[in-house]
Amino acid sequence: MSKRDKAPSSQLVAAAEALETQLARFESLAEQLRKAPLNSEKALERASKLLRDVAEMDQQLNASVGALVTAVTAARDRQHTQAEAVNARAQELQERADTFKTLLERYGALGTSAAELNQRMQEFAARRAQAQPGEQSAELTGSLDALAERMGQVAEEAEAVTRLAEEKDFNDVGQQADSLRQQILSARNKLNLLRKGLSPS
């Protein structure tokens, strides 16, 4: 912690301690003055000196109270500044949390879409295996085209999630979305090769 950070706190403590010390001294002098005898010239002189001392201490007390008020004001201003910084950070945290939640929701939807694509690919493979040689062209090609189109849509959404994640500095989510995009594009390329094999010669 720097001297600058310590200064306001030290000023507050010093001002409070000074006031406490002076207040105790003021009370002691006031008590002495209250009990001082007034029955001789010497006693009157002593009481007069005590009165002057009390008046002087009262002035010092007023100055110390002012110093303490100044220190308290400075402490309050520091607290206000820090509170504003905390509030700004809390707002930023909420915004970041909302963005992350949106990214996770979109990435979760990508996972659901990828599972759907995987299921459709399995169904396609089963139909292809069961189809007779003459039946493999038109119907299977249509299903394959629809599947490839859906893969393209999911890949585009994965790319959009990747861009948003990188823009918002959530690189881990971006990397996961991009990895999924690449897997989908690789699978679509294989489907395109398969389609060429199904096309009529």
Image (cartoon, rainbow, N blue to C red):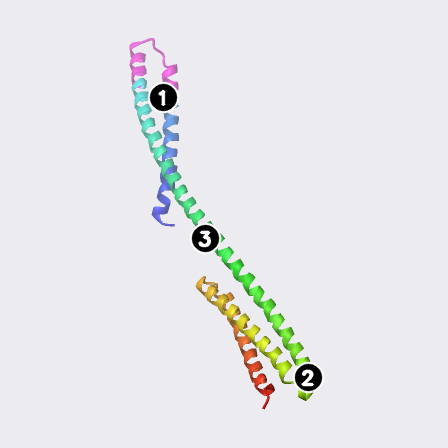
Q: What residue is shown at x 52% (from left), y 62% (from top)?
A: 103
| Residue 183 appears left or right of 135 | left
SS label for mark 3: helix
The amino acid at mark 3 is Glu
Residue 174 colored in magenta in the image: no
Q: What residue is shown at x 30% (from left), y 15% (from top)?
A: 48
Percent x, y for residue 151?
56, 74
Residue 43 colored in magenta in the image: yes
User: Which class describes the residues within 10 Å of circle 1: few (<14), some (14-19), or many (20+)?
Assistant: some
Which residue is labeled 3 in the image?
Answer: 92
Q: Which mark is residue 129?
A: 2
Q: Which residues are magenta?
A: 28-49
Percent x, y for residue 130?
70, 83
For the residues labelled 3 and 1, the Cα–Cα distance comes to 57 Å
SS label for mark 1: helix
For the residues labelled 2 and 3, the Cα–Cα distance comes to 55 Å
User: Which class describes the residues within 10 Å of circle 3: few (<14), some (14-19), or many (20+)?
Assistant: few
